[in-house]
Amino acid sequence: MKIDPDCIRDILLAIEEKSDGFHDFCVSAVGAVTERDTPNEYTQKYNKDELIYHIIQCNENGFFTNMRKSILGVYKIRDLSPEGHKFLNNIRDSCNWNKVKKQLLTAGSFSLKTLIEIAQNIAVTALSANLIK
């Protein structure tokens, strides 16, 4: 499966919205939505396979403080890690996000590491431009 940058961003926004250190953001790996799932405007546009794949990618890149999979196949995420918050803050602004996606297309290659680096560079550039004003 290819990494979808919009799905990554939407997952992080959804987890940030839900997480408070006590309640988990949950997605079931089974086809049907369960009572444990966290319905969210950000994640409803993706199927379960896409969500699970991108959740695993986010976890492997250190974006979550605690992710676990129950024996029933429910992925539970407690919160974003400092790295996850940092990355989300770099891509939160729609203008910056559109610049990031444009750079990804220009680069011609895509990995989550590339996405993180481009987002950081664009955020630093935007911050520098605002400081000069």
Image: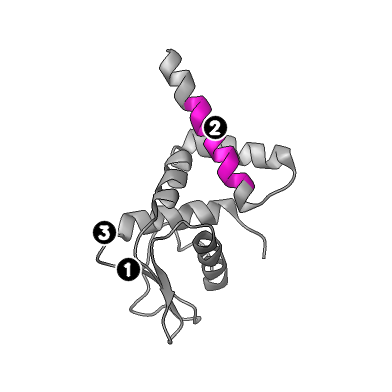
Quarter containing the C terminus: top left
**Residue nearer the viewer, 39 or 68:** 68
Q: Assess whether mark 3 and mark 1 are in contact (beta carbons under 8 angstroms).
A: no
- Label 2 neighbour load within 10 Å: few <14, some 14-19, many 20+: some
96 lies above or below 83: above
Query: Within 10 angstroms of label 3, few (less than 14), some, or many (20 or more) residues?
Result: few
Q: CA distance from mark 3 to mark 2?
A: 28 Å
Residue drawn where x is 66% and y is 52% of the image: 111
Residue type at mark 2: give it: Ile
Residue topped by disc 1? 24
Q: Horizontal and vertical percent for residue 38?
A: 36, 68
Query: On the rendered image, what quadrant is the N terminus found in?
Result: bottom right
Residue depicted at x 47% and y 45%: 87
Looking at the rendered structure, the kind of residue marked 1 is: Asp
Kindly report the secondary structure that dominates the magenta region of the rendered protein.
Answer: helix
Image position of 63 with respect to 89: above or below? below
SS under mark 2: helix
Instruction: Give percent across and percent down for residue 107.
Output: 72, 40
Q: Amino acid at mark 3?
A: Asp
Disc number placed over residue 20 in the picture, else none = 3
Residue lying farthest to the bottom in this orientation: 71
Q: Which residues are magenta?
A: 114-126
What's the image's color scheme? one colour
Tag 1's secondary structure?
loop
Which numbered dot is residue 123?
none
Identify the disc placed on residue 122.
Answer: 2
Where in the figure is residue 106, as x and y percent of width and height?
A: 72, 37
Picture layout, residue 109 above or below residue 49: above
Could you give the CA–CA distance between mark 2 and mark 1, rounded to whole angstroms? 31 Å
